[in-house]
Amino acid sequence: MPAVTETREQIEKLGQSSYKWGFETDIEMDIAPKGLNEDTIRLISARKEEPEWLLEWRLAAFRAWLSMKEPQWAKVAYPPIDYQDVHYYAAPKKQPGPKSLDEVDPELLKTYAKLGIPLHEQAILAGVEPEEGAEERLPVAVDAVFDSVSVATTFRETLSKAGVIFCPISEAVRDYPDLVRQYLGSVVPAGDNFFAALNSAVFTDGSFVFVPKGVRCPMELSTYFRINARNTGQFERTLIIVEDGASVSYLEGCTAPMRDENQLHAAVVELVAMQDASIKYSTVQNWYPGDENGKGGIYNFVTKRGACRGARSRISWTQVETGSAITWKYPSCILQGEGSVGEFYSVAVTNNHQQADTGTKMIHLGRNTRSTIIAKTISAGKSDSTYRGLVRMMPKASGARNFTQCDSLLIGDQCGAHTVPYIENRNMSARVEHEATTSRISEDQLFYCRSRGLSEEDAVGLIVNGFCREVLKELPMEFAVEAQKLLQISLEGSVG
Amino acid sequence: MSDFLKISGLHASIETDGGAKEILRGVDMTIPAGELHVVMGPNGCGKSTLAYALAGREDYEITSGSVAFKGKDLLELEPDERAAAGIFLAFQAPVELPGVNNANFLRTAVNAVRRARGEPEMDAVAFLKAVRAATKSLSMSDEMLKRNVNVGFSGGEKKRNEVLQMTLLQPSFAVLDETDSGLDVDALRIVADGVNRLRGPEFSALVITHHKRLLDYLSPDRIHVMANGRIVHSGGPELAEKIDQEGYAAFLADAA
Amino acid sequence: MSAPAAFAQQLEKTSGAARDAALALERIGLPGPKTEAFLYTSLRPLTGRSFTAPPEAPSADAVRALIMRSVPVDGPLAGQPLVVFVNGVFSREHSKYPDQAGVHIRTDATDAVQEDGDMPFLLLNDALYRDVTVLEVDRDTDAGSFVVLSLSFGTDTSFHPRLRVRAGDGASVTLTEIAAGEGAYLNNPVLFCDVSPRAHVVHTKLQQEDAQAVHMAAVRVAVAEGGSYDSFTLGLGGVLSRHEVRSVLGGAKAAVHINGAQLLTERQTGDITSVIRHAAPDCISRQTVRNVLGGHARGVFQGKVFVERIAQKTDGYQMNQALLVSETAEMDAKPELEIYADDVKCSHGATVGALDADQLFYLCSRGIPGAEARQILISAFLEEVLDLVTDEAARDALQGVLQQALAKRIGAVS
């Protein structure tokens, strides 16, 4: 049953409209019927040839989910979601993944091109074998998640030489079952929250990273997510384990085709950092935000959490959120190891009718743990954006420190910007500092830029990028440039 | 000589809590190409308003009158279009832009203006060369380029940064709004040098000042005295000397 | 949410509008651990208890003695007009104020009831108040200063004093409220403050209830154009206390100051909660709250600044600071901004931590022993914020009481 019916003309028409990444790829899909019950889960598990323990784990999560309520506390409003009206499994028919990249469907490569996957990565995906020793110039490994199934993974060999495992999680289940079984759900338990439970029951794919003791991952790891088929929820599951003294930088970029219906995305990302380990997780999220009337767009309900298990471990989240109709997302750190460090750098831009409720949780368990939160919120159009964060100093977190800075910028008088921090301190030697400001781009700043020859939109773009600088500088260079462009694109039409 | 800049019967007001307040009440002034004119006058007479009106600040509403610049209606243009057309305002209080790198700002502005003027954009290397030359001539350290625009700058640094922008944007008409205030003698000379280097048959300037000091370095062509929103007296450079010694009292009587 | 069992008997006896309030309260119940507005403030001191004991009328001597303790004759507030509530009802006998032109004080049996489900302890007062005292100040009249005493005597019983202040156009009045008592009672005072255009109300509060008592106060303030409500609360007493303010800036250029401080030790929980709603342009709100927490005490600060779309040019500032001076104390803070207007200047800050080690070291290096250095710093931290009390007599009174409290409890807090 082909899920995609649009003709090429339609696709081209879509490509000309304002959402640059709004296109569909004409590939035959293997799709499960709509609806969610134990049979759906058994089907997913069977298609993926999973071991019995994982099926049982999924079923337990599903049963927990049935008894849970969708969270209502976030400052977002949307009509009730019919969880039975969603396809929980969609895979390109040319399955399983290609043995070599030559087998990759050309349509898929076109998709990557439209996505703006950097040229050299496209070359890799297109099957251009790298010259001997050329890999230094091609430092990004891509695990592309196309709807539910990872179809291509590059740089596997280089990585495996270094002892790094980077593969679709479904492969990891097959090839490294002990690792997966040990860590899956150890940071975000299957019943952690409504959306995490749903993900645990039905996740179809995602990335798995394992960096062994003492290894600095030789390249940045990158994943591109796409939601392609109509009415397919996207339920990624990512698990990153970094052992003692090892480190990794992981980049995640997201785009989705333009649709009228709202599409559900409920991902779970789990990070585990052991002693002296370091994980840098960067996200640029520009999923379809819906049109200027608030029609369509992605529901992005994501649970991301990292555990700093070992002493002096470090987890750093950086996110630039410009897309999605609704964002519900709180990348968090559990700072258990003595002297461990958690960081959260965030830019959230909303325009038109977008709603974002995003922030972080820093749970300080261990002595001398430190966390930094820098959140920049920009609201334009008729949108609403909320920073929601929790800093908790537990009784044993002696000497712990947190610093939080939240700044909101409003563009126009029809939007809202909100700051909701929760600060809990149960240790007298722990210190929490929180600052927040709300302002708008001043007329003085705009006039100053314009009197130097900048157009109004360029002036706004420049000032907004300045406002976000502290966060953007945390992104890997290549992402930073893309993110700056995205900020400007997201705010188009919001001035004047 | 054709009229380079011609201000005729310019009235401007600003919205206040107590309603619209008229500040410019019929300014007439003609500045030929190549000349440097000076506006002097007591506080609150409308000097800065005149500067903002020429640069196109929105909250100053032009209620009547006209400004022709090289034969074009200046008041029709947006602030950035005026910059592209060659107008430059050195702000009395330069604005801080947190997080916006000074070098990046300069390059963005220079290329926006070059684009609008149909000139090729400068690449990073060419720009760096140009900006280094300019900073050197202004005795500025390159370190200022790495900082954010005007953030944490001293008063003197801000003014020098304005002159740097002017040097790079190559305007044909510059308005300096009390650029000399708060500067020591050395900085004053640097500002004056910046203006003098641009002087030529196709460059004019309007210098707004309280003090004669800056004029010693600039050799102006004409001095205008402003009071109560009008030009009440105009004369040669010797007028500055007279004001310096006698103050504005003699002119204010005329204005009332 | 738990049913308001602690008050079931009294709630059953209500009638009229109070009955509606009682039913509303029964419907929503008392806040439980899942109630966002009471996330950090446990009502455990109320659970399993019943506040049904009939209040015993205290002897006139007992009342007089408590008045003397609350407003000492040689203290800064001595001689000010007195409005006295005893066990939740207005006391003609103990109140003492001169007749003033343009100032009207009366007590009514019934009052308008708002059934505000959002504030359960206001609802409790709506259901159970016995009378309402109304203080009205005519336009352009300066009513001067009043001391409002809320005195409670008894155990397992609850009191619900209710005061309405109406300041007419251009009027002004200064209130210094003191809550004190003897016993394990619940005091549930409600203050309504209607501030007309250009009127100014100064409200200073000293909460020094019995250590066994529970104090749940609600203040509702509406400020019209050009008016101001300038308040400060100092929380010292009670095993559980909450001072909850809802203020609406309803006219242009209105101002509110919602400041406060708490000094809590042993097993005290003290909660300062406020919502400041900017509903008109050009308004100013200011809030600074400081907390010192020793023993097993728990301090709670919740402050929301809400800026409506119409409220352009809002200037809002909020700061909550807390010192933890024991290993077992806890501070929970939730400062919140909800903003729908773009031309605003709003900021908030919060810090929670221990005494500054550098400051301590500096004092010690000048020869001051450690314990004394800590006392100096703790006193300074709280005294500094008392500068925000605008009424001089009230400030002097609060300073005196704070000094005594620090002297008495400093062992517990340092």
Image (tube, rainbow, N blue to C red):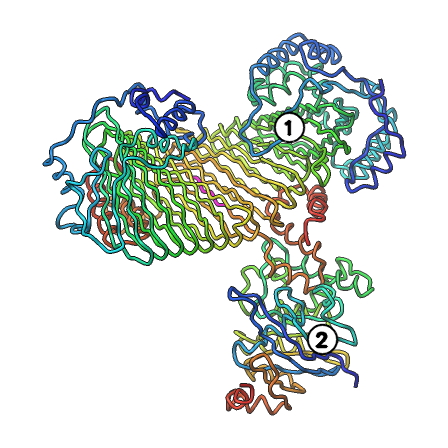
Gap in angstroms between the C-alphas marked 1 and 2:
56 Å
How many neighbours does mark 1 have within 10 angstroms: few (below 14), some (14-19), or many (20 or more)? few
Q: Is residue A426 above or below residue C402?
A: above
Asked whether residue A452 is drawn in magenta, I would say: no
Q: Residue C281, which numbered label? A: none
The chain letter under disc 1 is A
- What residue do we see at 78% from left, 58% from top? B123
Residue tagged 1: A79
Q: Residue furthest top?
A: A52
Residue tagged 2: B67
| Residue B234 visible here | yes
The chain letter under disc 2 is B
Q: Secondary structure at mark 1?
A: loop
Q: Is residue C282 above or below residue A159?
A: below
Tell whether C51 sits left or right of C61: right
Pointers 1 and 2 within a single chain: no
Tell whether C391 sits left or right of C223: left
Identity, as a three-letter code, of the amino acid under mark 2: Val
| Residue C357 visible here | no
In the rendered image, residue B208, in percent from the top left (x then y), is placed at: 60, 78
**Quarter of the image that includes the C terminus of chain C:** top left
In the rendered image, residue C122, in percent from the top left (x then y), is placed at: 36, 33
In the rendered image, residue A53, in percent from the top left (x then y), is placed at: 64, 9
Asked whether residue A435 is drawn in magenta, I would say: yes
Q: Secondary structure at mark 2?
A: strand
Q: Which residues are magenta?
A: A432-436
Identity, as a three-letter code, of the amino acid under mark 1: Pro
Towards the viewer: C158 or A427: C158
Total labels: the figure holds 2
Front label number (1 vs 2) = 1
